[in-house]
Image (spheres, rainbow, N blue to C red):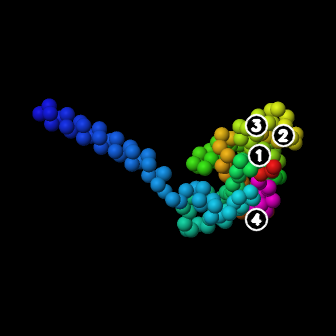
């Protein structure tokens, strides 16, 4: 009986290890990632406004249909990144995601930024140059250091009324996003 219980325990432990290995490696085998989806949309160094999700439409990303989403992909290996624009006086947020889809930085206009979004995004080497005053940054730029060179920014606007949606989307489309050398 003891021998049977040991074999049973060994089988359960081995099954658990195999299960963990499979669960942890499956995402690595996926050919379609967030990064490849963004490549398909064409969001390199420019702000792209996602189309509105209508009621009853497929919503694979689980986006809120009331929110306006702007996306931009940055490669800090090409130089410091920037995100600039004047956004409406309504709730908005900005989040930076790494290639794995994890949030590396996030802020809102509730942090005292107001309507002006002026974000400078630097990798560790560029931050050192900034500290040594070898890079010029305009006054008032919010400096963010990123551990990753490959990032994408998501800007979310929440218009208080549907009638304001088009104007808000136009303001977000005017925001600039990219690298500067």
Could you classify mark 1 by the number of other residues whose Cα lies within 10 Å: few (under 14), some (14-19), or many (20 or more)? many
Residue nearest the viewer, comparing 128 with 138: 128
**Earlier residue among tags 1 and 4:** 1
Q: Is residue 56 above or below residue 128?
A: below
**Earlier residue among tags 3 and 1:** 1
Q: How many marks?
A: 4
Q: Name the element at disc 4.
A: helix
Q: Is residue 69 visible?
A: yes
Disc 4 target residue:
166
Q: In the image, which residues are magenta? A: 168-178
- Whether residues under marks 1 and 2 lie with C-beta atoms below 8 angstroms apart, the answer is yes
Disc 1 target residue:
80
Q: Name the element at disc 3.
A: helix
* 177 is within the stretch colored magenta: yes
Disc 2 target residue:
135
Which image quadrant: the N terminus? top left
């Amino acid at each position: 009986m003891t021998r049977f219980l040991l074999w049973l325990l060994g089988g359960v432990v081995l099954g658990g290890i195999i299960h963990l290995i499979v669960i942890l490696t499956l995402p690595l085998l996926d050919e379609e990632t967030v990064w490849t989806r963004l490549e398909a949309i064409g969001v390199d160094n420019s702000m792209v406004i996602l189309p509105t999700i209508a009621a009853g439409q497929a919503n694979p990303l689980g986006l809120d249909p009331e929110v306006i989403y702007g996306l931009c992909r940055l490669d800090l290996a090409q130089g410091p990144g920037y995100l600039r624009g004047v956004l409406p006086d309504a709730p908005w947020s900005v989040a930076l995601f790494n290639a794995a889809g994890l949030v590396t930085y996030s802020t809102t206009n509730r942090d005292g930024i107001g309507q002006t979004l002026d974000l400078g995004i630097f990798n560790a080497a560029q931050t050192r140059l900034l500290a040594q005053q070898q890079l010029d940054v305009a006054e008032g730029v919010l400096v963010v250091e990123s551990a990753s060179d490959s990032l994408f920014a998501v800007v979310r606007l929440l218009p208080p009324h549907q009638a304001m949606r088009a104007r808000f989307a136009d303001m977000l489309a005017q925001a600039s996003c990219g690298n500067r050398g």
